[in-house]
Image: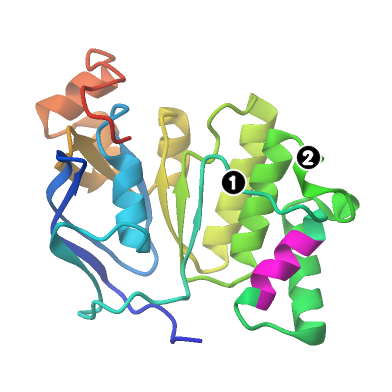
Amino acid sequence: MASAPRFPLVARGLTVRLGGHVALERIDFTLDGHSRIAVLGANGAGKSVLLRTLHGLIVPTEGEVLWAGSRARPTDQAMVFQRPVMLRRSALANIEYALAVNGVQGEERSRRAREAIDRVGLAALAGRAARVLSGGEQQRLALARAWSLRPRVIFLDEPTASLDPAAAGEIERVIGEIHASGTAIVITTHHLGLARRVADEIVFLHQGRLTEQSPADRFFTVPRSPEAARFLQGELPWTTTSPAS
């Protein structure tokens, strides 16, 4: 396996065009190895595109993503999607498969899979088919699957979307434990309460542009950009004209 990610993670002049549309335009920001960053903005602002580009799923049209000065995409990172894909096998086997793909074998694979599923509170459902789990349980399983790889950064795309408050609370608990274990977090969310509780910094996007990066407490009390202020006051529409979320 490749070596662990090196920090800082830097986006420099990041521009992404999708189907002739500019989804991201000249994005610059830095992530150290300890932060919890929440990416906020209306639907279509480019939040999911940013995460996919940082993770390496989208190649930027212009600009670059650098890990401590290198363009090489490290393997010791993970991404959890809003609608995670569950394999046709048990919950535990979903985690074991991810570990096997990443070269973890034998007793170590079994131990790490069971440890991960226990950490997210799903040990009692380890033998159940993953695809019959509830939405909240599937999202916790996706977090366990990513966490078992021991990444130094996890990208989370709307992990509590469409979940009831109890399920969302469980996801928030797991995110807190993942961060406490030493993993940096980059999360997109529409839930301002979640962003207040889990983020150290806020990155605010508006129509594909980064208009503000601030400490979370400052962002929520004294936002610097007018777009962020209107967003917090509920004056900025949740959906923009951009097709990229």
* Label 2 Cα neighbours within 10 Å, binned few <14 / some 14-19 / many ≥20: some
In this picture, which residue range is highlighted in magenta?
Answer: 93-100
Residue furthest front as drawn: 19
Q: Residue at image x 29%, y 49%? A: 50
Task: Answer with left or right where residue 164 lies relative to residue 32.
Answer: right
Q: Residue at x 90, y 51 (%)?
A: 124
Reading the image, the residue beneath label 1 is 84
* Residue 192 location (% of width, % of height): 40, 29
Of residues 43 and 211, the one nearer the viewer is 43
Residue 205, given in percent of the width and then of the height, sits at 22, 38
Q: Quadrant of residue 234?
A: top left
Q: Is residue 71 left or right of residue 39?
A: left
- Left or right of 10? Residue 196 is right
Q: Where is residue 9 shown, x and y percent of the image? A: 28, 68
Q: Amino acid at mark 2?
A: Leu
- Please tell me in which quadrant of the rendered image residue 31 appears: bottom left
**33 or 9, which is in the foreground?**
9
SS assignment at label 2: loop
| Dominant secondary structure of the residues highlighted in magenta in the image | helix
Seen at 74% across and 69% down, the residue is: 96
Does 47 appear above or below 192?
below
Asked if the residue at tag 2 contacts the one at tag 1, i.e. Cβ–Cβ closer than 8 Å, the answer is no
Residue 118 at least partly seen? no
Residue 5, position as x, y percentages in the image = 39, 77
Which residue position is annotated with label 2?
133
Magenta stretch: includes residue 211: no
What amino acid type should be assigned to the residue bearing mark 1?
A: Pro
Q: Residues within 10 Å of mark 1 (few under 14, many from 20)?
A: some
Against 225, residue 39 (above or below) is: below
Q: Secondary structure at mark 1?
A: loop
Tell me if 227 is positioned left or right of 90 in this view.
Answer: left
Alpha carbon separation for disc pair 1 and 2: 12 Å
